[in-house]
Amino acid sequence: MADKLPKKVYEQELFRLQAELVTLQEWVKATGARVVVVFEGRDAAGKGGAIKRVTQYLNPRVARIAALPAPTERERTQWYFQRYIAHLPAAGEIVLFDRSWYNRAGVERVMGFCTQDEYHRFLHQCPIFERMLVEDGIILLKYWFSVSDREQERRFRARRDDPMRRWKLSPMDLESITRWEDYSRAKDEMFVHTDIPEAPWNVVESEDKKRARINMIAHLLSAVPYVEQRARKIKFPDRPAPTGYVRPPRDEQQYVPDHAATLPGK
């Protein structure tokens, strides 16, 4: 396993890559490109942290996250891919799927939330569905975040002991500890059917979260044929002369209390 990436090196390279992501965003806006990035992998493998760093400096009107909840009763009666289609990008948009239609090949398969027929239908239809997306001009990138069972459990325990992150530890996460090999087999079978030339899987080694983020973002930038756009000139208008406006008295409005003034050492 590679050494841990030093914090200073990580922060410098991350900021450089995030600046390039802004350049990519401007190209997407200017050209009307449509980009879909799928984040999948083990629980606690670092998907959420990677998504956060990708979107940190991007315009949420251009780059948005799709993290769908469990399907409703109505959605369960729809074609499986239907509710995901509603979140696909229009021209000039980037959509990052924090988990995706691959739920069917992972948690639904392992936990028995779908039937055998539904599962095999998914494996048949998914490559067709993704080829249709690519054929229509969507740039589709798929990332699988890989982490060892020991590191996963260490991260679960860290979540349990941190009141700020305990909400991230779900009963399904704990279930994944006892079903490690089941999930491994499901992932292997999923790759056999869905690792297609038009939309291949890109595996991100995630034992070191910092290294994983850097590697994933660098790969994303290399996979999209963006070019830097000429920056438009921004000219600030002259402020007009006052016309006699008088601001209402402060005591007529309710202000948020100055909590900052109560802090020690302010």
Image (spheres, helix red, strand yellow):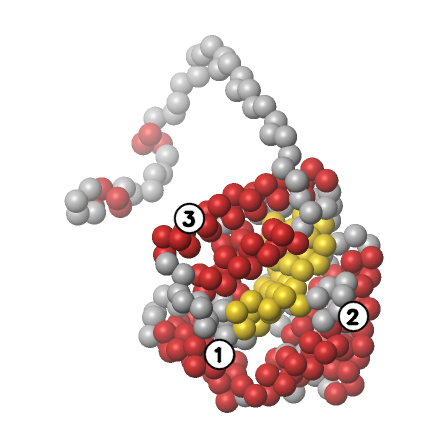
Q: Earlier in the sequence, mark 3 or mark 1?
A: 3
Residue ID at (68%, 57%) = 36
Residue 183 is situated, as x and y percent measured from the top left of the image, at 59, 83
Dot 1 corresponds to which residue? 148
Gap between marks 3 and 1, in whole Å?
Answer: 27 Å
Q: Which secondary structure, mark 3?
A: helix
Disc 3 packing (10 Å; few <14; some 14–19; many ≥20):
few
Residue 254 is situated, as x and y percent measured from the top left of the image, at 36, 38
Residue 154 is situated, as x and y percent measured from the top left of the image, at 39, 78
Can you say whether 99 is above or below 261 in the image? below
Q: Amino acid at mark 2?
A: Pro
Dot 3 corresponds to which residue? 12
Q: Taking 88 as reference, is 145 left or right? A: left
Quadrant that contains the N terminus: bottom left
Gap between marks 2 and 3, in whole Å?
Answer: 38 Å
- Give the image quarter of residue 203: bottom right
Q: Nearer the viewer, residue 135 or 178?
A: 135
- Give the image quarter of residue 140: bottom right
Dot 2 corresponds to which residue? 127
Disc 1 packing (10 Å; few <14; some 14–19; many ≥20):
some
- Give the image quarter of residue 98: bottom right
Q: Which secondary structure, mark 1?
A: loop
Asked if residue 37 shows in the view, the reply is yes
